[in-house]
């Protein structure tokens, strides 16, 4: 008899959802994480009474009512609406691309004028069927916005020229002919009050958790403890990169406490020129309408992942897609293990999609 029904490797959102569901189904679960803390990349830590998003800004948004009803069992969400500002060499623009952006860029006043301007630039560029991010971006918003607000940011973020990136990445951003600065087209949006770590704590309530335990280091020993493993780490790392490394982008944060209440007046300011070395600055208190006397900011620097770094963003292009498929075949041949989440499935998942996927898997599994 094994001690546990399930060993969940990784205490991020995917692992936490599965652990909760397994517990609800009466299973015995052990959750392990190699970091000293739970919550994976949605980990928040309190500094100067401000919940700091230690692994990058996470703004919960979804159109999926089932997911919203599920996650709000574990935290109350505030009314935060993401509306980042773009800073291009000191010029400020509204995001996502909307009438405020078009007015500032071209002086156009009506939606009709904005539409004509975009059409004119699109036509001049001669793009019929966009094949990559650059062409997709120009077809959506024209060359001026592409040059000032997309090209520099995207090339810093992904470390690749825009004409070598998949078009879908830019389709994440809405383009609107209205004065609406809400970054997301989502019915439900907000930040869990008290931070994401607390929310994950609630999800893992009553479940055994061990931090500082590296699954891949003690795999044989740990596998003996449970009937089945839910693995949320990187799929290529699991196989010791034997088919080659999948590419990821990593992120480094320079976090500072400032002795002033308001540094930039917004949670996120994107630096969209090519020269500024960081991609964006996050001022964490604005996620929760903070009134603290101090403020905490994080400059975000993007870099190519190399062995030993934290992987953040899978680079979902064709080449990596093919390699992932090969790893997936290997994964399907493994016994008593399920791979899931952003790293386990090598997929640029948003949080709500991670929850939906973990719930679906739980339903089938349990
Ligand atoms: N993007 C951009 N300019 C911006 C913000 C985003 O060109 O000011 C592009 C960029 O290619 C980025 C993509 O839109 O990778 C998706 O941005 P999002 O904010 O959704 O990325 P995340 O928050 O997941 O890093």
Image (spheres, rainbow, N blue to C red):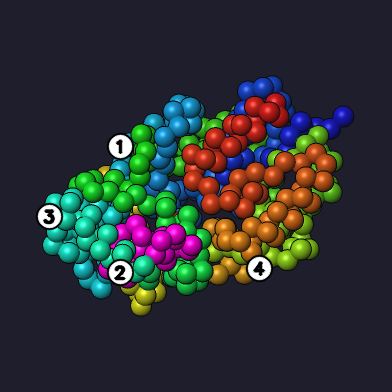
Residue 178 place in picture, x, y as percent: 21, 46
* Vertical side of 83 occupied by 275: above or below: below
The numbered mark at residue 307 is 4
- Mark positioned earlier in the residue sequence (4 or 3): 3
Mark 2 and mark 1 lie on one chain; the one further toward the N terminus is 1
Which quadrant of the rendered structure holds the N terminus? top right
Label 1 crowd bin: few (<14), some (14–19), many (20+), radius 10 Å: some
Which label sits in the foreground, 1 or 3?
Answer: 3
Residue at 42% across / 51% down in the picture? 172
Q: Which residue is drawn at 69% across and 44% down?
A: 339
Label 4: element kind: loop
Tell me which label, 1 or 3, sits earlier in the chain: 1
Q: Are marks 4 and 3 in contact (CB under 8 Å)?
A: no
Question: Is residue 141 highlighted in magenta?
Answer: yes
How much space separates mark 4 and mark 3, taking CA atoms?
Answer: 50 Å
Label 1: which secondary element:
loop
Residue 124 is labelled as 2
Tell me how far mark 2 sits from mark 1, CA to CA. 41 Å
Q: In which quadrant of the rendered image does the C terminus lie? A: top right
Foreground residue, 102 or 263?
102
Name the residue that disc number 3 marks: 109
Q: What stretch is highlighted in magenta?
A: 127-150
Assess mark 3: CB under 8 A from ligand 1? no
Q: Can residue 316 be seen in this view?
A: yes
Tell me the crowding category of disc 3: few under 14, some 14 to 19, or many 20 or more residues within 10 angstroms, Cα based: few
Q: Look at the numbered discs 1 and 4 and tell me whether their residues touch, using CB distance below 8 Å.
A: no
Query: Residue 35 has which mark?
Result: none
Please tell me the numbered disc located at residue 79: 1
**Front residue (pair 117, 151):** 117
Crowd band around label 2 with a 10 angstrom C-alpha radius: few (<14), some (14–19), many (20+): few
Q: How crowded is mark 4: few (under 14 residues within 10 Å), some or many (20 or more)?
A: few
Pointer 3 with pointer 2, Cβ within 8 A? no
């Amino acid at each position: 008899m094994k001690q546990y029904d399930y060993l969940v490797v990784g205490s991020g959102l995917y692992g936490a959802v599965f652990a909760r569901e397994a517990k609800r189904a009466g299973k015995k679960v052990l959750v392990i994480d190699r970091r000293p803390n739970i919550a994976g990349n949605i980990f928040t830590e309190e500094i100067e009474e401000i919940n700091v998003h230690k692994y990058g800004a996470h703004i919960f948004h979804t159109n999926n009512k089932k997911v919203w009803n599920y996650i709000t069992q574990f935290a109350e969400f505030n009314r935060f609406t993401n509306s980042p500002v773009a800073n291009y060499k000191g010029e400020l623009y509204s995001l996502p691309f909307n009438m405020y952006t078009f007015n500032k860029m071209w002086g156009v006043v009506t939606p009709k004028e904005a539409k004509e301007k975009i059409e004119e630039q699109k036509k001049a560029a001669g793009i019929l069927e966009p094949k990559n991010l650059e062409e997709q971006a120009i077809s959506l918003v024209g060359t001026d916005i592409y040059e000032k607000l997309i090209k520099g940011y995207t090339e810093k973020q992904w470390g690749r020229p825009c004409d070598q990136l998949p078009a879908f990445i830019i389709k994440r951003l809405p383009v609107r002919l209205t004065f609406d600065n809400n970054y997301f087209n989502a019915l439900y949006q907000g930040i869990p009050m008290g931070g994401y770590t607390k929310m994950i704590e609630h999800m893992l309530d009553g479940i055994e958790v061990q931090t500082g335990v590296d699954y891949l280091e003690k795999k044989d020993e740990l596998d003996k403890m449970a009937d089945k493993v839910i693995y949320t780490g990187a799929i290529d790392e699991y196989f010791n990169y034997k088919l080659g490394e999948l590419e990821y982008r990593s992120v480094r944060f320079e976090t500072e406490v400032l002795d002033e209440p308001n540094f930039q007046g917004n949670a996120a300011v994107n630096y969209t020129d090519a020269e500024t070395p960081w991609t964006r600055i996050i001022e964490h208190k604005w996620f929760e309408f903070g009134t603290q006397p101090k403020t905490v900011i994080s400059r975000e620097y993007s870099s190519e992942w190399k062995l030993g770094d934290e992987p953040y963003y899978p680079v979902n292009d064709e080449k990596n897609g093919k390699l992932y498929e090969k790893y997936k075949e290997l994964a399907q041949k493994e016994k008593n293990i399920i791979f899931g989440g952003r790293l386990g499935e090598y997929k640029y998942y948003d949080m709500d999609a991670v929850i939906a996927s973990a719930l679906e898997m739980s339903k089938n599994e349990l």
